[in-house]
Image (spheres, helix red, strand yellow):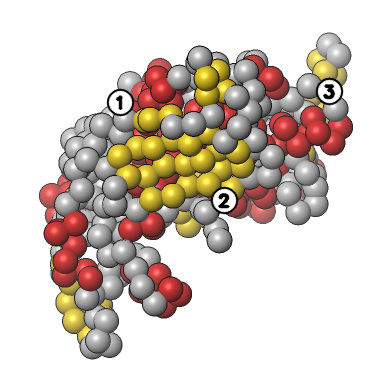
Amino acid sequence: MGSVFGTLFRISTWGESHGGGVGVVVDGCPPRIDLSESDIQFDLDRRRPGQSEITTPRKEADQAEILSGTFEGQTLGSPIAILVRNKDARPEAYTEMSEKFRPSHADYTYQAKFGIRNWQGGGRSSARETIGRVAAAAIAKKVLVKEYAPDLEIIAHVKSIREIEASVSADDLDFDTVEGNIVRTGDPEAAEKMIELIKEMRKEGNSVGGVVECVVRNVPPGWGMPVFDRLEADLAKAMLSLPATKGFEVGSGFEGTQLTGREHNDAFRMEGDRVRTKSNRSGGVQGGISNGENIVFRVAFKPTATIMTEQETVGLDGEDTILKGRGRHDPCVLPRAVPIVEAMTALVLCDHAMRQRAQCGGS
């Protein structure tokens, strides 16, 4: 019912923002993959709240517990269940929202669909749901590196926040540089401006959005399942399933519409025994299949819906009313979205790597 993602490497996430905990069940993971809770914790720490002055102040250790699917430090091939307990839930901050719908949030649509909703912090629509995705992706990365692409790199960064844009190409992105600033952009000079803007938005009780760019290096050619499960189509679904996303583009994206075919086409050339392209406006995917070049795409995130200023809305009683947001929220989701974008990328690639081997054989 919408909580399952993947075909061969399949995950099911569960849990609500202010319930007992959140987590994931991973099915289809190959056996004999080295796995410990510390492998999962690294990326959970990058995603967790309260990590800097520009994120939500909610204090959660987000400690992963592996409940099944491993033995003596290795995967068994059976379902892997991972639990992260909620420790700093404060549902009382959302009492008013039990009767009023937050503008541009999922409150009204969940009520319209199910006739019931968990109004405590957004319930299932909260970004805390993504904990399960990030935990599962830590496993997917280990599978990818061991079984399919030992040199694979997935690096995302904040490309822009509002009108402030990082001046760095996807090909030049460096993980240490991205992690070296709290906004997680590949351009340290732009980072200071972005941080100041986010602080300003928080002070005003407002929020701001932007774009996350991701590059994937050393993907073998041949991954992708046309026609309906094209690689970029599954990446788009993965990214647009994330909270607060509003757009996806790969390679030249919308800017490519301003070029002619002669300008846009990526000419082929031989480099040793490899077929390469002179440019990469295709973003590493052609015909829904990876071509061996860097996969490059961008994801648009809207401003955080819950803001600390009064807004017009409607209540459960059908009457117009006013609501001022409460609780603890990110004034900008972009810095914490970076590891989540990387996670969904790993999940898509792992699934397609396994599907490629199942259909076509080889590595």
In this view, the mark in front (1 or 3):
3
In the image, residue 151 sits, relative to residue 49, either above or below, namely above
Identity, as a three-letter code, of the amino acid under mark 1: Asn
Q: Hey, what amino acid is under mark 2?
A: Val
| Residue 320 appearing in the image | yes
Give how far apart the Cα atoms at labels 2 and 1 are: 33 Å
Q: Residues within 10 Å of mark 2 (few under 14, many from 20)?
A: some
In the image, 274 versus 322, the foreground residue is 322
Contact? badges 1 and 3 (CB < 8 Å):
no
Return the residue found at the far top: 272
Question: Secondary structure under badge 3?
Answer: loop
Q: Alpha-carbon neighbours of circle 3 within 10 Å: few (<14), some, or many (≥20)?
A: few
Quadrant housing the N terminus: bottom right
Residue 362, numbered circle? 3
**Which is nearer the eye, 1 or 266?**
1
Q: Amino acid at mark 3?
A: Gly
Residue at 43% x, 26% y is 40
Quadrant of res 161: top left
State the CA–CA distance, disc 1 to disc 3.
41 Å
Are the residues at dot 3 and dot 2 in contact (C-beta closer than 8 Å)?
no
Residue to which mark 2 is pinned: 4
- In this rendering, position of residue 119 left or right of residue 326: right
Q: Residue at x 78, y 21 (%)?
A: 363
- Mark 1, Cα crowd under 10 Å, few <14 / some 14-19 / many 20+, is some
Nearer the viewer's eye, disc 3 or disc 2? 2
